[in-house]
Every structure is written in structure tokens, then in C-alpha cells.
Image (cartoon, helix red, strand yellow):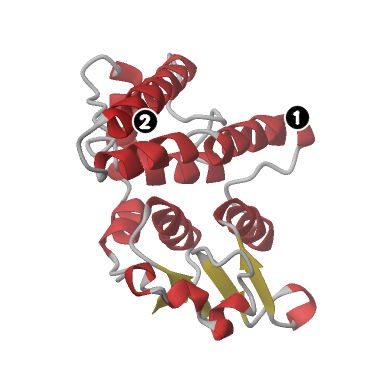
Amino acid sequence: MTIALHTWNTPNGRKISVALEEMGLPYEVKVVDITKGQQFDPAFLAFSPNNRIPAIVDPDGPGGAPITVFESGAILLYLAEKTGKFLPADLRARVPVLEWLMWQMGGFGPMPGQVHHFLMQPEGPARDYGLARYHAETKRLYGVLDRRLAGRDFVATADGPSVADFAILGWAWRHERHQVPFDDLPNVAAWYARMMDRPAVRRGFEVSLG
């Protein structure tokens, strides 16, 4: 049965379209135009109470009953559990995936998101302060990622990508907007190229999300 992906063309939305393509799950995009405030529509709030995209509706949830899931990290974990893909069953192997997924959710998303915000503000002291603070932290996080990827093909597992890679990729996709070139991040650059070369990842970025 077809999963409904309620989303907009953002890094968090792209995490899920990439994962759905990689997992081979049928889905249909339901555009939520956040530029028009559609995330506040009561029908959307009924299953995404934090008025944020993305959210999914899976008519074939656990036990065959429908389920709704909001928050991109929760959606990735749900889809991984549903399919048995991109999340190791062994707890020791699973822990790094969870660590790096939480790393993305807690930092490598909120921090570059603030860069996006302050870049759009009028010139002045507030803009300058915000950009200096959040751009520095964003660059630090890219450095953390680059060190993690030294000698590794993927972020959390040795034998292929995981949901952590999909989560991080959604934000690395906007690195130019973050004003973070890959010139001094060779490991990130190689990982990014490797991920973007995957056919399912390409499909996940090509599908229209609004």
C-alpha cells in the first residue's frame, strides 16, 4: 500500500524521499506549502501536532492498521524497522547509527538552519552576530563529520549506508547555502559524491516535493 509523504522541499523532507526510494517503498507526495502556512491546517495538525514537515501516513502500519508518524528522525527509524533495512539488528552495530542520527537531529540541522535564517535578515549587527555564531558552529559540525569519515565509506556502518547517512545527506545537500565548501573537507566530499551517485538517492532528490 502507498505511504503518503506530507512534506515540502526542505532538507528534512529530502531525508524521507531518499529513504523511501532506497527502501523501495511505494509513496505519494502530499505537498504542504510552508510558504503559505499550510503546516497549520487542522487536517495536517491532526497527525503532525508540532506543525512541522515531514510527516507520513502509512495505511499498512503495524498489525496491518494505519499509522501516522511525524518528526523526520522518527520516520526514518519507523521505515527502517518496517523494512528491516538500513538499521542493523545487532544492538552493538545499531548504536553508532542511533548516535549519528541523533547528532544530525540535535546539531547538524538546527545549526545550519540558523545560518539559513540569518542570511535572510537585513544587514546589521543582529545579522552579523547570528551568522558569526551559527556559521562557526556549522563549520565545526562539518569538521566533526569529516573526521568521522576518515577511512570510512559511510557514517555509521562499514557495509553500506544507514538511516544516519540519509539524515545527514539531507542537510549536506545544502552545504553551498550554508556557505561551507568541501575544499577542506575531503572525506565529506568523497562521501557526498558516493551517496549522490546512488540511483535511489538521485531519485529521492529528483522527485518533486513542492
Q: Residue at x 48, y 40 (%)?
A: 110
Q: Residue at x 47, y 59 (%)?
A: 16
Instruction: Tell me the quadrant of the picture where the C terminus can be found.
Output: bottom left
Q: Nearer the viewer, residue 164 or 162?
A: 164
Q: Position of residue 136 (x, y in %)?
A: 37, 20
The amino acid type found where label 2 is placed reads Gly
Comparing labels 2 and 1, the label whose residue is closer to the camera:
2
Quadrant of the rendered image containing residue 140:
top left
Q: Earlier in the sequence, mark 2 or mark 1?
A: 1
Quickly name the residue at label 1. Answer: 92
41 w.r.t. 118: above or below: below
Lateral position of residue 91 relative to residue 164, left or right: right
Q: Residue at x 32, y 39 (%)?
A: 118
Mark 1 Cα shell of 10 Å, populated few (<14), some (14-19), many (≥20): few
Residue 176 has which mark? Answer: none
Which structural element holds mark 2? helix
Neighbours of disc 2 within 10 Å: few (<14), some (14-19), many (20+): some
Q: Position of residue 165 (x, y in %)?
A: 48, 39
Answer above or below: position of 144 versus 178: above
Q: Secondary structure at mark 1?
A: helix
Measured along the vertical axis of the image, is residue 54 above or below residue 44? above
Marks 2 and 1, how far apart at CA: 39 Å
Label 1 amino acid?
Answer: Arg
In the visual, does 206 lie left or right of 146?
left
Residue most extreme to the front = 125
Q: Position of residue 5 (x, y in %)?
A: 48, 72
Residue 125 position in % (x across, y down): 29, 28
Q: Residue at x 56, y 41 (%)?
A: 105
Residue 130's disc number: 2
